[in-house]
Image (spheres, rainbow, N blue to C red):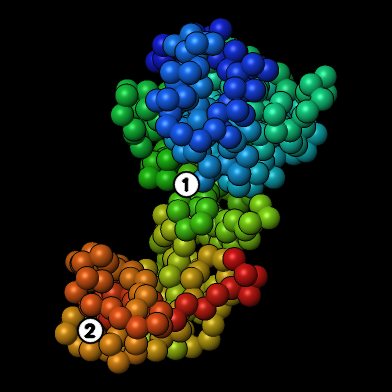
Amino acid sequence: MYRALNTSISPDDIRWLVGPEGSGLLADLSRQAGSLAALAERLKRRFSPERVHLALAQIELRRRAAGKFPDAQRMFFLPETIQQATDFYVARYKAGRFPAGEPLAEICCGIGGDLLGLAARGPVTAVDLSAAALVVAEANVRSLLLPEKNALDCRFCAEDARRFRVDRFTAWHIDPDRRAGGRRTTRLENYQPGPETIDRLLLECPNGAIKLAPATETPERWQREAELEWIARDRECRQQVAWFGDLAGKPGLRRATTLRSRPDRSVIVGTVAGEAHLRSPVVDRLGRYVFDPDSAVIAAGLTGQLARQHALAAIHPAASYLTGDDPIDDACLQCFEVTDELPFDRKRLRALVRRRGIGRLEIKVRGVEGHPDQIRRELHLQGSDEAVLLVARAGRRVMAILARRIKPRAGA
């Protein structure tokens, strides 16, 4: 992170937390039953109030981070950095685009989300202005990657990114602070460090990767020289990355990548690359199947490219739903087999789901007014069957499309 953390936690307390005594206390707390208030009163007999608060807050942070990090119970977090941290699956995917065994720099490393992926590839220098973040990042690398502390091939550097040089590295990654003004921003000029620092880093070493918010607009020069990639995990678009130099697979084009995580921590990867905002052919009737592109595909403007790739058509010029007569197994698409289609009339739809005995209904509303929860309440669902309801414009009408989800062969 660019700025020093706005925190009252002392460096000594953070070092205590990640050390043997703090780590042991966290392990004990995770096994305790009862209210946190009662635990706090008992702990204050052994530790200072500041350290008790720090330990109990860490338990809550680990709980919040569990969706991002499978090993959250072995990690350490800071509240200022947990939301922006790259999750385990995305970090591992991104690290795979960097050369293995070459010296890398991870700038504005925070608590080490991307660092964990890069450090598994080879030697890396982690840079952050916050001493607290560096202590936590180092603890996470040691806890998850290298139990033998002497084997740690990772350097930690407390330095301002505006002055850090990358000309001695093969490639580098930066995660600029998007909350430098206290509120989240998607405007590149409000990032810290900003585009002037990033452009200077690119002059020193052209092989750079810049992590951005999905909605951030990039300069025209970046769009010409970089490959812009939008990355989603489990249907949520998590970030945009501008890849430069040797890291850019297709300079000047866009890429959308979706990761479907599985219980064994492996992922199914789907990707599409090409020109943005290509028009898809529009049809007046639905095919046997309707397809919902992944959020990364939509954010990257690659729905038309994906439609061309699979010979699909759009159901409406302004809708992202595609249709065709054959099933498609692509991680970038959710596939639904159409069972019924009718104008979106709640009375007729209620009668249809009653006849079908549908008691569980996934509802997706796209490009029209209406909230899934309100529609669900109005349908008075009852029965043992399940289905998917897609509400969207098709042709000149708003349609209700009742369908069943086709699961990918890979089982994600």
Element on which disc 2 rests: helix
Q: Foreground: 299 or 30?
A: 30
Query: Residue 211's x, y, as percent?
Result: 51, 37
Quarter assignment of residue 402: bottom left
- As measured in the structure, the alpha-carbon distance from the residue carrying label 2 to the one carrying label 1 is 36 Å
Quarter of the image that includes the C terminus: bottom right
Of callouts 2 and 1, the N-terminal one: 1
Q: Position of residue 209 (x, y in %)?
A: 58, 36
Q: Is residue 2 visible?
A: no
Q: Is residue 304 above or below residue 287?
A: above
* Badge 1: residue crowd in 10 Å (few <14, some 14–19, many ≥20): many
Residue visible at 64% across and 16% down in the picture: 21
Q: Circle 1 sits on which residue? A: 238
At 45% from the left edge and 53% from the top edge, which residue is drawn? 236
Q: Is residue 296 left or right of residue 107?
A: left
Mark 2 sits on what residue? 350
Q: Which mark is residue 72?
A: none
